[in-house]
Image: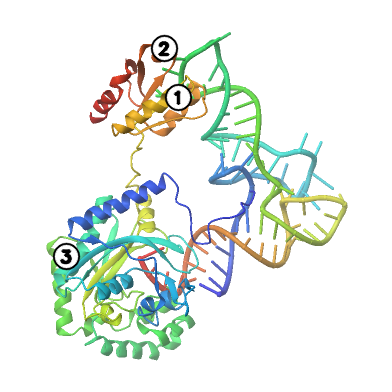
RNA sequence: GUGGGCGUAGCUCAGUUGGUUAGAGCGCCUGGUUGUGGUCCAGGAGGCCGGGGGUUCGAAUCCCCUCGUUCACCCCA
């Protein structure tokens, strides 16, 4: 293969039609669900002061080694970073604008992490998500989880599992962390080297190890759910009761920890069971009751999730659901008189709101018909010398078996719109 | 960052124990007696076999390096 001079940077890719149309449709579908739930869209900058993301946690790989950061041209230069996720930006925006709580917002857009690309993992990837800031009520947790669930269902996905856990809060997590650390340290000899390193930085993350050698120690580890304070346990129970009431199935996953350090209490993840790859988490989220305060805002509880657009589409492929949108071109104008008649006809059709396309370069009728077929348009309008002389056009059905007929040129837009509403 | 697989036409892949002008299918283009696609038939365009170095009389085929890609660990959506 002749090497092109340039190619998309590692871990990024061009998303071309028709895949691009499918992604747009997916985001539209999410916007519908978010809107139904009373969430408004926030569009925040793609880069922020590096400090915004540093608040996500010193033991989070996403901030410590996966950030695309750079200095601007200011004096002194500002240290900026492409956003590796959006929750921090949203909390920064909340602290900056102080909207009236509860602030219910949704977002979508690209995010950036400097990682080794892999199945379902890219350096530039897209997420859709929601955040509810300023509501401590477990009802808010349920609403948020139910929204994600509805969204997956609306796409046609059936093989998605909800994993649920509570990570406790500052009143009870320290005691658990001590117990966990004790357990892991006393069994350190049985852990892999990598897990021993992780243990130094963040014992919780050891529970996430996929290395088989670690499993016996992990299986024997104490569970956060056994250490929850009364308040936290009550909150967790309320969330579960709400999900039960909505008949949303879930599995309690007591070893579910998440990669960002800010999570407290309710924590959840959505796994696409149809995906055979290691990256089968199509969404995740939870509570982050301390994050707004960390970013200089008022103490504000928060709950939200982020869903990976790329992985959701992979899951849709695996389940063979959510095909792309139907073609927007409804009628293809075949002009064998040279092409100038197609110009006016297409414009008139478009004025009437009917998607119309034509070919260029004065190709043969056969060639133009091939392009018409390929366009996916259900109809073709054929214009030759005869039609021009008679002020008519031949309207041909490309998908059904009703053949073709000559109609007055004036009535083309009307006729097509009638046929399309059938 | 660590480890494995793979890199031949736009796409999916063949290429025999290294041997003359590198193949198929799909896609694309042009035709099939002059106005008709989706089926069929016939032609055609399109590859310095990822890049560099080496071994050899001779390398897509063997060796080394490099780049890319892919999968897994890690991390996470």
Number of the front mark, 1 or 3:
1
Same subunit, labels 1 and 3: the answer reads yes
Q: Is residue A19 left or right of residue A139?
A: right
- From what the image shows, is residue A189 above or below residue A353? below
Q: Which residue is mark 2?
A: A386
Residue at the location (23% across, 30% down)? A421
Residues packed near mark 1 inside 10 Å, few (<14), some (14 to 19) or many (20 plus): few
Question: In the image, which disc is placed on residue A110?
Answer: none
For the residues labelled 2 and 1, the Cα–Cα distance comes to 15 Å
* Mark with earlier residue (2, 1): 1
Q: Position of residue A104 (x, y in %)?
A: 20, 66
- From what the image shows, is residue B18 above or below residue A196? above
* Mark with earlier residue (2, 3): 3
Question: In the image, which disc is placed on residue A243?
Answer: 3
State the SS at label 1: helix
Residue A287 visible within the image: no
Residue at the location (41% across, 12% down)? A386
Q: Which residue is mark 1?
A: A340
Q: Is residue A94 left or right of residue B64?
A: left
Q: Position of residue A161 (x, y in %)?
A: 28, 62
Q: As rendered, which of A416 and A313 lies closer to the eye?
A: A416
State the SS at label 3: helix
Whether pointer 2 and pointer 3 mark residues with C-beta atoms closer than 8 Å, the reply is: no
């Amino acid at each position: 293969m002749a090497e092109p001079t340039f190619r998309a940077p590692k871990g990024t890719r061009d998303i071309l039609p028709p895949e691009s149309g499918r992604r747009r449709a997916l985001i539209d579908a999410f916007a519908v669900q978010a809107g139904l739930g009373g969430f408004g869209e926030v569009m925040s900058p793609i880069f922020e002061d590096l400090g915004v993301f540093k608040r996500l946690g010193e033991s989070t790989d996403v901030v410590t080694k996966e950030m695309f950061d750079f200095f601007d041209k200011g004096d002194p230069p500002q240290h900026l970073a492409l956003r590796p996720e959006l929750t921090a930006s949203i909390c920064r925006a909340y602290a900056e604008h102080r909207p009236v709580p509860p602030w219910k917002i949704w977002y979508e857009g690209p995010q950036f992490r400097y990682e080794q690309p892999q199945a379902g993992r890219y350096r530039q990837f897209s997420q859709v998500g929601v955040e509810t800031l300023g509501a401590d009520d477990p009802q808010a947790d349920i609403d948020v989880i139910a929204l994600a669930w509805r969204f997956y269902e609306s796409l046609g996905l059936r093989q998605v599992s909800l994993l649920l856990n509570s990570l406790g809060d500052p009143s009870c997590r320290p005691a658990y962390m001590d117990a966990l650390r004790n357990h892991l340290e006393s069994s350190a000899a049985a852990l892999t080297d990598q897990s021993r390193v992780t243990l130094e930085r963040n014992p919780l993350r050891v529970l996430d190890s996929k290395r088989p050698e670690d499993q016996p120690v992990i299986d024997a580890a104490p569970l956060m759910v056994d250490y929850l304070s009364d308040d936290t346990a009550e909150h967790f129970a309320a969330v579960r009761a709400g999900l039960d009431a909505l008949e949303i199935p879930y599995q309690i996953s007591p070893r579910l920890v998440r990669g960002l350090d800010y999570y407290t209490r309710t924590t959840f993840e959505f796994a696409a069971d149809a995906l055979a790859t290691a990256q089968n988490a199509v969404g995740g989220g939870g509570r982050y009751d301390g994050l707004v305060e960390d970013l200089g805002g008022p103490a504000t509880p928060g709950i939200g999730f982020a869903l990976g657009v790329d992985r959701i589409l992979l899951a849709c492929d695996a389940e063979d659901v959510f095909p792309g949108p139907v073609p927007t071109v409804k009628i293809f104008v075949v002009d064998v008189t040279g092409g100038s008649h197609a110009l006016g006809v297409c414009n008139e059709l478009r004025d009437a709101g009917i998607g119309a396309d034509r070919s260029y370069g004065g190709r043969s009728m056969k060639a133009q018909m091939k392009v018409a077929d390929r366009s996916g348009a259900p109809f073709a309008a054929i214009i030759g010398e005869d039609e021009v002389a008679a002020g008519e056009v031949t309207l041909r059905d490309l998908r059904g078996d009703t053949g073709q007929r000559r109609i007055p040129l004036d009535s083309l837009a009307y006729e097509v719109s009638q046929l399309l509403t059938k």
